[in-house]
Amino acid sequence: MSGNGKGFTLMEVLVAVTILALSFMVIMDNFSVSMDNIHRVGRASEADYQRTLALERLLIPGIEKDPAKGDLYVQGSRYQLVVVKSDEGGRLTSLRLEKIR
C-alpha cells in the first residue's frame, strides 16, 4: 500500500497480474503434457491389444471373432470359449470355457 492507504499502486497490480499469468501458464503447460501422456498410453494400449489379438488368431485354431465384438470366441469339438463380460470400450475382460453337449 502506498500513500494514504486507500488502494494499490499500478506497479503492485502489474506484479500481481504477472505472477498470476506465470502461474496460469505453468498449470496449462502441465495439463497439456498430461493430456499428451494420456493419449500416448491409450494408443500404446490399443496397439498391444491388437498385437495380442493377432497372435491369438495365429495360435488358436478355430478363432472366429474379435472377442470384443461377439459372444463366441473359440469353438472346438468339445468346448467353446465364451465372453463373460466386456468393458464399455469393447475390450475383453473375462472368458468362460464351456463344455459343448
Image: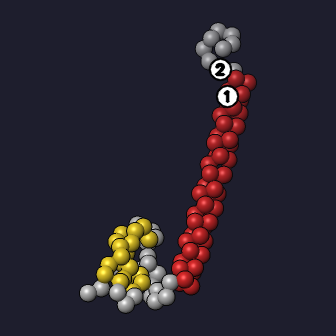
Q: Quadrant of residue 87?
A: bottom left
* In-front residue for pair 70/14: 70
Pointer 1: what residue? 16
Which amino acid type is marked by label 2? Phe
Residue found at the very far front of the displayed protein: 78
Residue found at the very far top of the displayed protein: 4
Mark 2 touches mark 1? (CB < 8 Å): yes
Indicate left or right for 85 with 28 as reference. Answer: left
- Is disc 1 surrounded by few (<14), some (14 to 19) or many (20+) residues within 10 Å? few
Q: Give SS at disc 1.
A: helix
Indicate left or right for 12 with 74 as reference. Answer: right
Q: Comparing marks 2 and 1, which lies closer to the viewer?
A: 1
**CA separation, marks 2 and 1?**
10 Å
Q: Does residue 89 lie above or below 81 as drawn?
A: above
Coloration of the structure image: secondary structure
Pointer 2: what residue? 8
Q: Does residue 86 lie above or below 12 as drawn?
A: below
* In-front residue for pair 49/79: 79
Which amino acid type is marked by label 1? Ala
Q: Does residue 27 lie above or below 83 as drawn?
A: above
Residue 67 picture location, percent across and down: 44, 78
Residue 45 picture location, percent across and down: 58, 66
Q: Earlier in the sequence, mark 2 or mark 1?
A: 2
Q: How many marks?
A: 2
